[in-house]
Amino acid sequence: MIDVEMLRVFTAELELCKVQPGETVAVLTAAGAMNDYAQTFMIAASSLGATVFHVDIMDHATANRAGVYGKTPLAGNRAAIDALKSADMVIDLMGMLFSAEQIEIQSAGTRVLRVGEPMHILKQMFPTTDHRRRVELGEQMIKNARELRVTSAAGTDLRYRLQQYPVVTQYGYTDTPGRWDHFPSAFVFTQGNDGEIDGTVVVQPGDILCAFKRYIQDPVKLTVKEGRVTAIEGNGIDAALLRDYIESFQDPRAYAISHIGWGMHERATWYHMLATPRLREERIMNALSYYGNVLFSTGPNTEVGGTNDTPCHLDIPMRKCSLYLDDRPIVAAGKIVIPELAAAGM
Ligand code: FE2
C-alpha cells in the first residue's frame, strides 16, 4: 500500500536531489526495516526516470544506535558495497554515517542521502534552496576563518583553531556527486586543528544530549585541553551519566572534541523530542538544525577526513550561546546576527 502523501514528499525531495533519467538510485536498508520508505523512494525515483534497486542486508545487531557510530552490518559485505558504489545515488535508510563503507561509496562518486526521521518531521523540516544558500554562505565564512570561539553567559568559553579540516554542509538534499547529506537538515560545521581546541563548555539545563534523547537537567562543566575533554564536572545526574557513558567505551579517543558549528533551520523546534513518539530510531534533526543553536560534539572526526574513528559520538546542541569567527559575531546568544545568514523573518 502506497501512501500518496509520502510519495509526494519523497518525489519532491528527489527532485531537489536532481534525480533524472539515466541515473541509478539504490535504496539501502537493514533487516527489512523502513520498508515503507524503501518502496516509496523507489517509486519516486522511478517516476523521475531513474533505474532503481534495493539492497537489504542482514542486521548482525551491529547497526547504529544513537551515540554508537561507524560500525554497521554492511562491513565486509563486498557484493553489497560494490552494488551501492555502482549507483549514482544511495538512499541510506540504515545509517552508515562515520563508517569506512560510507567513505568508500562516496569516494566512488555516489551521492548519499540519509533518511531516518518520521514522516511528520520530514514534512515539517522539508528543505529549500534558501537553506542551501545560507548553509553554503556559512561554509565560506568558516573556510575564511582562523579561529572559532563559542561563549555563553553560563560560562562557556571555548576556542578552536581552524584550517586543518574541511567544512561540512548539511542542507537536507544533495545533487553533487560523492556528497552526503541528511534529509532534513540545515547546519554547517568544521573541526578544530589537532591539539588546538582549548577552554570550557558549560552545558545548561535544556541543552540536548542527542545520544540519550535527553534534555540536560543539571549543568555540566567540561574542561577541554589540547582538543580533549580532561574533566567532566557537575553535581547532578547528567555529569555522572556523561562520565559513565564515555568511560564505558574504554577508548581514550572517545574524549576528543569533534565537530563544531551552528544550526540554521527556521522551522526546527526545540521541544520535538518530547512531542515525537518513538516510531523511528532517529529523532534528532530538529535539535541538530535548530535555528541559532551551537552544535558542540565529542568523539570521531572521520566525517571531516580525520583518523579518529571512535564509536563514541556525542552531539550536544546548546541554546543561548554566542559563536565568533575571528572575533566577528555570527551567533549572539542564540540569534544569528549576520543578515545574509538569517532566515526571512528571523
Ligand atoms: Fe555529530
Image: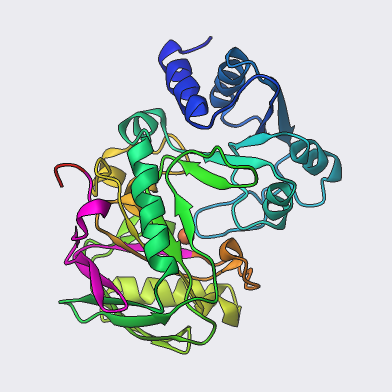
Name the residue rendered at 52%, 45% in the picture: 181
269 or 234: nearer the viewer: 269
Left/right of residue 336 with respect to residue 326 in the rendered view: left
238 or 258: nearer the viewer: 258
Q: Give the residue furthest to the right.
A: 79
| Image location of residue 253, percent across then percent down | 58, 79
Range shown magenta: 314-343
**Location of residue 47 (image quadrant):** top right
| Image location of residue 311, percent across then percent down | 60, 65
Name the residue rendered at 42%, 59% in the picture: 139
Left/right of residue 304 with respect to residue 189 in the rendered view: right
Name the residue rendered at 19%, 54% in the picture: 339
Q: Is residue 315 magenta?
A: yes
Total labels drawn: 0
What sort of colour scheme is used for the picture?
rainbow
Can residue 202 be seen here? The reply is: yes
Can residue 30 be seen here? The reply is: no
Left/right of residue 89 with respect to residue 330 in the rendered view: right
Q: Is residue 51 magenta?
A: no
26 or 161: nearer the viewer: 161
| Image location of residue 292, percent across then percent down | 24, 57
Name the residue rendered at 37%, 45% in the picture: 133
| Image location of residue 306, percent across then percent down | 62, 71
**Location of residue 81 (image quadrant):** top right
Is 185 placed above or below 33 here?
below
